Amino acid sequence: MKPTLTITPGEPDAEKGVQVVKFAGEFDKAGHMEIRGVLDDVVKVFKLENLIFDFTGLKFINSESIGYLMEIHNILDKKKKNLVLVGPDTHVKDVLKTIGIADVIPVHATLSAYLNAK
């Protein structure tokens, strides 16, 4: 069976203080379970300032996955690190705004817009 969600962790960029993780597919219960181990490992060893989730390829997100994003945000916040979301499509952006996640976790239209605003 084809995975519903894939993630591609990029190399940490110490100069910019960021690491980008690209998401593609659907961040639902099945997708969440498929990537959780890899993503937990990325978060566990993350040492830079900003962990960026690039949602450009994300087509769907559900409440369980949003809860998981909040878990990650809280883990990073305790370590004085930031979670930043970039590139959500209109649907994903609307969900993030409606639930109030965009008030807690910064959301930017593109990765370059975020990096230029830093």
Image: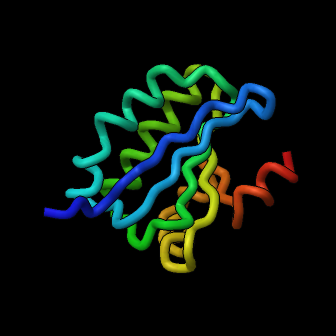
- From what the image shows, is residue 118 above or below residue 43? below
Give residue 38's quadrant in the image: top left
Q: Residue at x 60, y 44 (%)?
A: 20
* Relative image position of residue 42 (x, y in whole percent): 45, 30
Q: Residue furthest bottom?
A: 90
Q: Residue at x 56, y 79 (%)?
A: 90
- From what the image shows, is residue 40 above or below residue 83? above
Q: Residue at x 63, y 58 (%)?
A: 86
Q: Nearer the viewer, residue 50 or 112?
A: 112
Q: Nearer the viewer, residue 69 or 117?
A: 117
72 sits left or right of 31 in the view? right
The number of numbered badges drawn on the structure is 0
Q: Residue furthest left?
A: 1
Q: Residue at x 62, y 65 (%)?
A: 87
User: What scheme was used to colour the molecule?
Assistant: rainbow
* Relative image position of residue 66 (x, y in whole percent): 40, 54
Quadrant where the N terminus is found in the figure? bottom left
- From what the image shows, is residue 102 above or below residue 17? below
* Relative image position of residue 62 (x, y in whole percent): 34, 64
* Relative image position of residue 30 (x, y in whole percent): 20, 57
Q: Nearer the viewer, residue 114 or 65?
A: 114
59 sits left or right of 55 in the view? left
Give residue 65's quadrant in the image: bottom left
Quadrant where the C terminus is found in the figure? top right
67 sits left or right of 34 in the view? right
